[in-house]
Image (tube, rainbow, N blue to C red):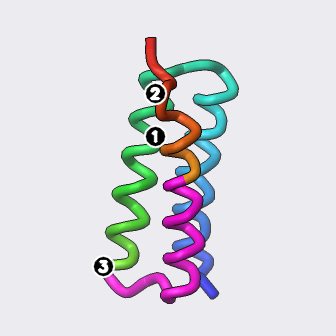
């Protein structure tokens, strides 16, 4: 189980990415995806995520990457 603070950080990053995708803001969506990816990696390296949570979040980031592969101008 993630701590409340970590969960809020992750949810905030995911919400920003979803909002940018919904509004078709391509550059901001790519930036938000990069920030989410870096956040998940950082939280894992700092030991703030359990392996199960890290795997779940990593899958989510990878799904966004696949979904956005052709998402550019």
SS class, disc 2: helix
Report the Cα–Cα distance between label 1 and label 3.
20 Å
Report the Cα–Cα distance between label 1 and label 2.
6 Å
Q: Position of residue 17 (x, y in %)?
A: 56, 40
Mark 1 vs 3, N-terminal side = 1
Report the Cα–Cα distance between label 2 and label 3.
25 Å
Dividing the picture into quadrants, the one containing residue 38 is bottom left
Tag 2–tag 3 contact (CB < 8 Å): no
User: Residue tagged by mark 1?
Assistant: 32
Mark 2 vs 3, N-terminal side = 2
Q: Point out the image quarter for the N terminus.
A: bottom right
Q: Residues within 10 Å of mark 2 (few under 14, many from 20)?
A: some
42 shown above or below 18 = below
Q: Point out the image quarter for the C terminus.
A: top left
Tag 1–tag 2 contact (CB < 8 Å): yes
SS class, disc 3: helix
How would you classify the magenta stretch by its main secondary structure? helix
Q: What numbered label is drawn on residue 28?
A: 2
Q: Residues within 10 Å of mark 3 (few under 14, many from 20)?
A: few
Q: Position of residue 52 (x, y in %)?
A: 57, 85
User: Residue tagged by mark 3?
Assistant: 45
Report the residue at 49% width, 44% height from top: 65
Q: Which residues are magenta?
A: 45-62
49 horizontally vs 43: left or right:
right
Q: Residue furthest top?
A: 73
37 shown above or below 45 = above
Q: Residues within 10 Å of mark 1 (few under 14, many from 20)?
A: many
SS class, disc 1: helix
Dividing the picture into quadrants, the one containing residue 47 is bottom left
């Amino acid at each position: 189980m993630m701590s409340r603070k970590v969960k809020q950080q992750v949810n905030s990053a995911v919400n920003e990415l979803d909002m940018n995708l919904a509004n078709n803001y391509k550059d901001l969506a790519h930036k938000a995806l990069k920030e989410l990816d870096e956040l998940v990696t950082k939280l894992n390296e700092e030991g703030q995520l359990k392996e199960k949570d890290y795997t779940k979040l990593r899958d989510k980031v990878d799904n966004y990457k696949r979904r956005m592969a052709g998402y550019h101008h």
